[in-house]
Structure formats: C-alpha cells, structure tokens
C-alpha cells in the first residue's frame, strides 16, 4: 500500500474545494496542499451543471443581511439552521463575491457595466442574486490561480477517512482509489483534511447534478462518526423527461390534466390553483409550505419509471419527473468550518447549518465561498502547528480497508426498483412508506457481496431517509 503525505488534504474540486485551496495557500505559502478529485477538468454541480450558470446571493447592505437572515430562518423548518452560521454567510457574502470578481469570474452586467441582480428561489422580492455563466471559464480562473502552488491528484476517488479512535477522535487523511482500472488504493495522511465532495443528488436515477460526483459524501462522513444535520432535505425540481430541462408550474392552471394508471385522465382540484403564484416563485419543491400540495398531487401520479404524464392546453402532453438537484444538509460545522471531528473541516454542499430545509436560491454558491474560505484558512492555521500522524497508527486503518477491498471484488447491481421508489420519498410524508424503503435498504446493506461504492451509495440514501423519518416522527 502506497502512502502519500501532505499538510492540508482537500477532497473535491468544486467551488468549495478550490476556494478552500486558495485560502489555505494564501494563509500559509509554505504548506503542502493537495486537492483530490475524481476528474481533472470542470466537475460537479459547480463547474459542470446542465444550466452552465450559477446565481450567488450577495448582501450589499446591512438591510440585505437582515432580510436574508429573516428569510432563511422562516424557511428553515422542519430543518434547522445555526444562526451564527447564517450571520457569517450574510456578512462575508460581499467580500467573497469581490474575491470572485478579482479572480476573473464574469458576473452578468448591463451595457453600462452595472451588475445585474435578480430575485432568488423562496425570496421573490429580493434583488441580491448575481449570476455568472460559462462555468468552465470560472473553473479556469481558479485552476490557473492555483496551478503550480497546489498539488492536484486527479482521477482518484475518496473511499474513506482515516481516523484515530481516541477519546477525541481525529481525522488524519483519507483512503483513495483510482477511478480507472486497476483501481489501485492509496492512503494520504495529512495534518488537516477538508471535505468538499458535494452533495447526494447523483444518487438518484433522475438528477441534475454535475458529473464526476458519485454522491456518497454523507456515508463517508457518517462512517467516520461526523455529526450530520438536515441531510434528509434534498431539493427536488420538476423537469421534462425528454431533455431534463426545467418544468415550471406556470402551465398548472385550469385545464391541467394528469394521466391515471388506467389510461384515463384526472383534472387538478381547483383549490390547488390558489398556490400557483407562490409555487412559481421557487423551482425546488418546498418542505412544509402550503404550495407543496401541488407537488404532492403530481407525485400521486408518478409511474414506476419515475415520470408523470401531464397535459396543459398550451403545451399538450409531456412526461415530467422530480429530479434531485442539491442537498441542504451534511456535516454540521462551526464558525471555523470544523466538523465534530478534530482536524476535519467541511464546506460546500456536504456541510450544513447555514441552510434549513428550504434554501434561498443562490445561497449555496455563497456558502461554498464563505465556508470554503474559512475551511481553508482554519485548516491551514491548524496544520501549521500540528504534527503528522505516525505510520504505526495508519496500520490498523489499512487492515480495515483491506476488508472493504475484498468486498469490492464482487459486483452486485443495486436493485433498480428500490431506487426508483426512493425517488418519491423526499416529498412524501407517508412515514410507513419511508420506513419500508429504509428497512429494505437496511437488508440490502447487510448483504455481504456489495461493492464498496454501492455500499456507500446505499448508506447515503439510507441516511437521507432516516433523517426524513426522524423529522416526521418528532
Ligand atoms: C443544475 C444546477 C443548478 C444550480 N444552480 C445553483 C444556483 O444558481 N445557485 C446556487 O447557490 N446553487 C445552485 N446549485 C447548487 C450548487 O451548484 C451546488 O450545491 C454547489 O456548486 C456545490 O459545490 P461543491 O463544491 O460543494 O460540490 P460540487 O461542485 O458538486 O463538487 C464536488 C467535487 O467533489 C468531487 N468528488 C465527489 N465525490 C468524490 C469522491 N468520492 N472522490 C473524489 N472526488 C469526489 C467531484 O468530482 C467534484 O470535484 C445548482 C445545482 C445544479 C445541479
């Protein structure tokens, strides 16, 4: 087993990981910094999402900060937010936005050079969202700034965190596996580690997340014993089956029909149209807002292939599906982006506490920059004072991983039907249904012949369901 050594290990090269790398480098020019990524080019939802554009919430004034914090708090339930993190998010959104501009990221401006500002999902009256297009250009801004000063380990997938089991559990690196055959494993020990592996949307057969994210960051965090929060709250958006383009509730008005299993049609109850204006003001389905009734109506008619056939007078018949977009939960972090484990930091979509169940559109990009910066800064400061773990303590962890590698030799396909049913779960408040799926996953996980990657994926899905159940029952 080869062992590599670095001072600061960053897992993931999306907006969060690269921001963390930049801040760690700026804080400590002499530290050895390594960024691990499944691929070398633009990846993840940050740099390769299907919209090729991202919005970022920026609070330009105290009033903006105050309104943002109030909105975020009112949208949080049934999830939770940590007010201190929301305060940091609002206060540091402007400096981090300015950093991006300085880096060369091109936010949309009018012909006079003024920034174009937009409303965001769940915040229809605000004008705080700045947008940049051409994500590959944004990736190039980061990578050219980091080139030569940070080591990029591309083509490697993180499959576990290395952890010392003492009274204060400490993370000292990660296990990696090559994405291409022969799938060699490699251990990297580090003084500090930053998790920036993105969210769980790719676990769903129908999703909109960017490529090169296997989607199992939750399982990696959970296996290490990291405290998670809000991980049951995933954003689901309706999109057309034909090209995965966004489908809007604008066509949900009198005359709207859905196809029934027996081939007949059903009209939406007129009471549902009352929610139309509110539903149009956000793309993701909402948790615990009245307009979720409209989503429920569609979900009731979901076929086993994951689609609903809908008809509107202006568009005719179309197949649409709820597609996983982004998660709102992950590792609970503190103001320094530290997780509950010593020397482990988290940022971006796999970190939690700054968003509740419903997230204001554009707030995730802000979070990648604000907490990516903090993760890089504080991980570098800790690494400057810390010692490297000794090789003796690494031996035990390798032994544990050898067991997992044995498991990986057997390839068993995930039960597609089960996964198809899970698609429906994030919005369903039917707790017996959720328990059933969760139990089935439990059984599947006990199966001895699952490859590690699939095991991690199922475990992540199970964590999402367990959290949803928890919120339903309490
Ligand atoms: C279509 C779409 C539009 C969106 N629009 C907006 C928007 O306008 N505003 C907003 O705020 N948010 C938006 N989001 C959400 C937002 O883009 C993401 O939440 C955010 O970019 C996540 O950044 P990240 O760095 O945490 O993760 P990602 O950008 O997903 O990056 C994860 C990185 O980790 C790597 N990786 C993952 N797992 C492994 C592993 N096991 N081993 C090695 N490498 C791994 C990936 O290759 C990638 O480099 C959108 C999402 C989608 C899908």
Image: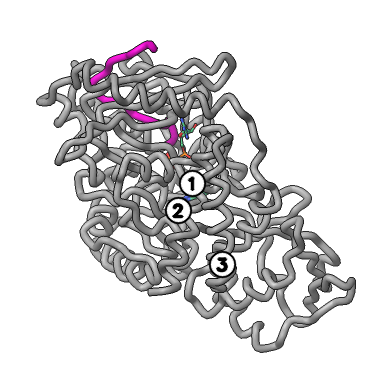
Q: Quick one: SS at disc 1?
A: helix
| Left or right of 35 in this view: 433 | right
Residue 6, located in which quarter of the rendered image? top left
Residue 96's disc number: none
Q: Secondary structure at mark 2?
A: helix
Residue interval drawn in magenta: 1-14
| Residue at 38 percent of width and 63 percent of height | 356
Q: Nearer the viewer, residue 412 or 218?
A: 412
Tell me the residue that label 3 is attached to.
427
The answer to which image quadrant residue 175 occupies is top left
State the predominant SS element of the stretch in magenta. Answer: strand
> How far apart, in angstroms, are the residues tagged by discs 1 and 3?
19 Å
Tell me if residue 19 is in the magenta stretch. Answer: no
Residue at the outermost right position: 263
Labelled pair 1, 2 in contact (Cβ < 8 Å): yes
Q: Position of residue 460 (x, y in %)?
A: 48, 47
Task: Name the side, left or right, on which 198 lies relative to 49.
Answer: left
Q: Position of residue 217 (x, y in %)?
A: 43, 41
Mark closer to the chain start, 3 or 2: 3
| Residue where numbered disc 1 is placed | 459
Query: Can I make out residue 98 in this image?
Result: no
Q: Position of residue 34 (x, y in %)?
A: 33, 21
Q: Where is mark 2, residue-wise?
A: 463
Q: CA distance from mark 1 to mark 2?
A: 6 Å
């Amino acid at each position: 087993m080869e062992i590599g050594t670095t001072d600061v290990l960053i897992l993931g090269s999306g907006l969060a990981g690269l921001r963390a790398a930049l801040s760690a480098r700026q804080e400590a020019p002499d530290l050895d910094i390594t960024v691990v990524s499944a691929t070398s080019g633009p990846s993840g939802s940050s740099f390769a999402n299907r919209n090729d554009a991202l919005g970022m919430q920026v609070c330009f004034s105290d009033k903006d900060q105050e309104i943002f914090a109030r909105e975020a708090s009112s949208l949080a339930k049934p999830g939770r937010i940590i007010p201190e993190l929301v305060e940091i998010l609002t206060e540091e959104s402007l400096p981090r936005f300015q950093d991006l501009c300085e880096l060369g990221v091109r936010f949309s401006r009018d012909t006079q050079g003024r920034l174009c500002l937009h409303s965001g999902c769940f915040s229809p009256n605000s004008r705080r969202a700045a947008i940049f297009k051409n994500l590959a250009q944004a990736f190039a801004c980061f990578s050219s700034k980091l080139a030569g000063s940070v080591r990029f380990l591309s083509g490697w997938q993180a499959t576990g965190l290395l952890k010392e089991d003492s009274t204060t559990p400490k993370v000292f690196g990660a296990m990696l596996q090559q994405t291409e055959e022969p799938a060699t494993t490699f251990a990297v020990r580090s003084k500090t580690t930053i998790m920036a592996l993105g969210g769980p949307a790719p676990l769903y057969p129908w999703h909109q997340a960017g490529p090169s994210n296997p989607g199992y960051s939750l399982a990696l965090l959970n296996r290490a014993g990291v405290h998670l929060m809000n991980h049951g709250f995933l954003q689901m958006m309706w999109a057309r089956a034909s090209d995965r383009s966004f489908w809007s509730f604008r066509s949900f008005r009198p005359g709207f029909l859905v196809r029934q299993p027996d081939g007949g049609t059903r009209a939406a109850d007129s009471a549902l149209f009352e929610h139309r204006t509110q539903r149009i003001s956000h793309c993701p389905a909402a948790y615990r807002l009245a307009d979720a009734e409209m989503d429920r109506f569609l979900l009731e008619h979901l076929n086993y292939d994951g689609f609903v056939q809908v008809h509107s007078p202006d568009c005719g018949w179309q197949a649409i599906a709820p597609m996983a977009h982004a998660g709102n939960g992950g590792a609970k972090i503190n103001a320094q982006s530290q997780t509950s484990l010593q020397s482990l930091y988290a940022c971006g979509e796999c970190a939690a506490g700054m968003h509740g169940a419903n997230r204001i559109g554009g707030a995730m990009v802000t979070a990648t920059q604000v907490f990516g910066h903090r993760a890089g800064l504080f991980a570098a400061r800790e690494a400057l004072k810390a010692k490297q773990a000794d090789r003796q303590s690494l031996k035990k962890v390798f032994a544990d991983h050898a067991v997992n590698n044995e498991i990986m030799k057997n390839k068993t396909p995930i039960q597609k039907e089960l996964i198809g049913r899970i698609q429906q779960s994030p919005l369903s408040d039917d707790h017996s249904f959720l328990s059933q799926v969760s139990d089935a996953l439990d059984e599947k996980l006990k199966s001895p012949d699952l490859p590690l990657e699939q095991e991690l994926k199922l475990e992540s899905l199970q964590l999402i369901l367990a959290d949803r159940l928890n919120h339903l029952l309490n």
